């Protein structure tokens, strides 16, 4: 139909009375479809981005595309279904090494990209190539405006040097044993081995006239963090504390200290005794969760409809200073979530408040107890919330495994007191519900230990603070069916003896989950054995009462402070 014909039809339609029959040569429905096809897309309608070009292949069950941007090889791995906003991960170097995080992110709808510009070590020319790649992937293929950057080893130079030039285009940065100062690696001007070949590449790629020019260069990642801090870019670094290739303290350690001084947020995950290899984590959940939390354009809906209580609300606002691997079990790492007090130094000797979450041994997570760890960190202690294995019959984990992990965590803290900055004779173990049971188990369940552990290091804390704990696992208490035969070995009430650390218990008389009678009986058994045990009673309080009332939560903290002060376990004001 010509434009003139359309115009005549429109005129006829407008001049006919409403009740008059239509005399258009085409039915009205077809005419409207034709008109819509001639109109431009409505404002706000997003056109489907073009498909990626190049050679296609399979990558771990996903479609991979290899093509060029500005003459440099680029690859993109596409998810089966892109998440809203088309989020993506951009690798600095060594794409495909330790792919588990990428595979999980692809399953969540992320794209994964890599530009191959090897041997450029993040030099200005490499940043220019990255600029071209970013422009192509975001403008032509509609990937999200802010990718997550992944810097593995020397890939850290690429990620940070591009990010500092483009801070408003970065969602977050995950560095794995990353190079943050080329004077450390490949320069070898510190504790590391260095690499003469790669040091020569630095001199050539950066255009330095001589080594002195490179050694006085002040634009390494550790030197240029202010733009990232101002843009509030969150960082995550995973590192081995025995790395002699890219020493963590010359790279991650310097960067973390300076970034925090600038007001930036960085999470550290330490792998004690691990060198530069292996990279990554056996269980990549902390890496995946960090990237998904910060780089998802449309955050996923909350998995649980449970209304948050006051402690949940506080926990959601907190992040630990670092995570430390204290143990490997069941094919995964277990972490200490460490809150360091202001002014903390690794050679400090501060008391430690170690807290353990509840959840019936089958649920819960360390974040639940962050407010307790953070509160005592503000008082000058090192606060730690621990992760432990959960009861799972399909995986063969038991309540005894939960207890073993609690004992391992406390033993690790005492063994590594010098690097954690704590006094090994001032450790407080605290726990809520099933976490209270695990905390009590550090002091009471001798013999429930991992076979290969150094039992010469005591896992008995210097004080216990138990919040509505599982204290009696007999048929009259809680957990008897979950533990089964041998429950007495894991029942605090039935394992009381002399020389149990001073204990403070908070419990409600209306608790029908972990009955109040068990707490009363435990206190009597402790007193009869010559131990100090105080029971703070909340009349009518149900299970978990102090977590659901902000006033009661604060009152619990205040009473705990007074208890610890009486034991000289609170640091004196500095």
Image (spheres, rainbow, N blue to C red):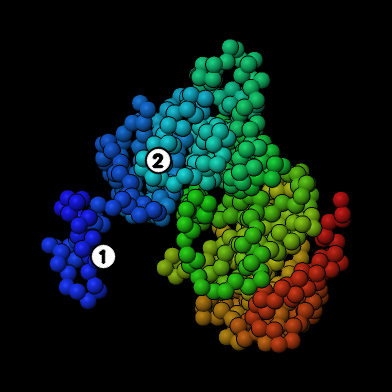
In this rendering, is residue 279 above or below 16?
A: above
| SS under mark 1 | helix
| Front residue of this view, candidates 322 and 289 | 289
Residue 58 in the image, given as x and y percentages of width and height: 28, 44
Identify which residue is drawn at 62% across, 38% down: 227
Q: Tell me the mark number nearer the camera, choosing from 1 and 2.
A: 1
In this rendering, is residue 390 above or below 338?
A: below
Residue 509 in the image, given as x and y percentages of width and height: 70, 86
Identify which residue is drawn at 59% across, 45% down: 233
Using the image, tell me which numbered label, if any, was put on residue 139.
Answer: 2
Displayed quadrant of residue 261:
top right
Callout 1 environment at 10 Å: few (<14), some (14 to 19), or many (20+)? Answer: few
In this rendering, is residue 504 above or below 339?
A: below
- Alpha carbon distance from label 1 to label 2: 43 Å
* Left-right relation of 426 to 490: right
Residue 203 in the image, given as x and y percentages of width and height: 55, 17
Residue 383 in the image, given as x and y percentages of width and height: 71, 57
Identify which residue is drawn at 73% across, 69% down: 465
* Left-right relation of 49 to 105: left
Write down the residue under mark 1.
14
Give whichever of discs 1 and 2 has the lower sequence position: 1
| SS under mark 2 | helix
């Amino acid at each position: 139909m010509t434009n003139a014909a359309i115009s005549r039809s429109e005129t006829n339609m407008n001049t006919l009375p409403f009740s008059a029959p239509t005399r258009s040569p085409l039915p009205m429905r077809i005419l409207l479809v034709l008109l819509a096809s001639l109109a431009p897309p409505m404002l706000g309608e997003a056109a489907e981005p073009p498909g990626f070009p190049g050679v296609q292949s399979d990558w771990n069950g996903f479609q991979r595309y290899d093509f060029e941007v500005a003459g440099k090889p680029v690859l993109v791995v596409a998810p089966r279904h892109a998440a809203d906003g088309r989020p993506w991960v951009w690798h600095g170097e060594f794409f495909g090494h330790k792919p588990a995080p990428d595979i999980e992110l692809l399953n969540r709808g992320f794209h994964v990209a890599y530009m191959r510009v090897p041997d450029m070590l993040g030099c200005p020319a490499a940043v220019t190539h990255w600029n071209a790649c970013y422009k192509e992937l975001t403008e032509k293929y509609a990937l999200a405006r802010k990718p997550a950057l992944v810097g593995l080893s020397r890939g850290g130079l690429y990620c940070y040097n591009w990010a500092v030039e483009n801070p408003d285009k970065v969602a977050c940065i995950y560095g794995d044993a990353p190079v943050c100062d080329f004077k450390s690696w490949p320069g070898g001007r510190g504790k590391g081995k260095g690499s003469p070949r790669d040091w020569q590449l630095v001199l050539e790629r950066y255009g330095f006239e001589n080594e002195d020019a490179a050694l006085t260069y002040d634009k390494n990642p550790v030197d240029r963090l202010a733009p990232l801090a101002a843009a509030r870019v969150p960082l995550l670094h995973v590192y081995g504390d025995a790395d002699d290739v890219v020493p963590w303290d010359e790279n991650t350690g310097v960067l973390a200290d300076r970034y925090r001084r600038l007001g930036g947020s960085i999470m550290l995950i330490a792998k004690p005794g691990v060198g530069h290899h292996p990279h990554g984590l056996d269980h990549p959940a902390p890496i995946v969760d960090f990237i998904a939390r910060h780089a998802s354009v449309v955050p996923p809906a909350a998995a649980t409809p449970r209304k948050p209580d006051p402690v949940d609300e506080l926990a959601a606002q907190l992040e630990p200073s670092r995570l430390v691997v204290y143990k490997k079990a069941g094919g995964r790492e277990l972490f200490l979530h460490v809150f360091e007090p202001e002014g903390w130094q690794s050679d400090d000797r501060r008391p430690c408040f170690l807290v353990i979450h509840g959840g019936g041994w089958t649920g819960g997570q360390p974040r639940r107890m962050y407010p307790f760890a953070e509160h005592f960190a503000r008082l000058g202690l090192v606060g730690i919330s621990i992760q432990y294995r959960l009861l799972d019959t399909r995986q063969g984990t038991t309540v005894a495994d939960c207890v073993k992990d609690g004992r391992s965590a406390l033993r690790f803290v005492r063994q590594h007191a010098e690097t954690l900055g704590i006094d090994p004779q001032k450790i407080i173990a605290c726990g809520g519900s099933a976490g209270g049971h695990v905390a009590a188990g550090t002091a009471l369940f001798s013999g429930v230990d991992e076979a290969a552990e150094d039992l010469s290091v005591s896992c008995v804390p210097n004080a216990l603070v138990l919040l509505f704990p599982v204290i009696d696992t007999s048929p009259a208490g809680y957990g008897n069916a979950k533990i089964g035969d041998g429950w007495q070995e894991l029942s605090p009430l039935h394992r009381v003896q002399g020389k149990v650390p001073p204990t403070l218990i908070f419990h409600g008389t209306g608790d029908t989950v972990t009955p109040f009678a068990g707490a009363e009986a435990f206190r009597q058994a402790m007193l009869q054995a010559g131990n100090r045990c105080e029971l703070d009673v909340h009349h009518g309080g149900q299970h978990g009462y102090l977590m659901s009332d902000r006033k009661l939560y604060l009152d619990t903290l205040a009473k705990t402070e007074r208890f610890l002060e009486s034991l000289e376990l609170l640091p004196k004001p500095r």
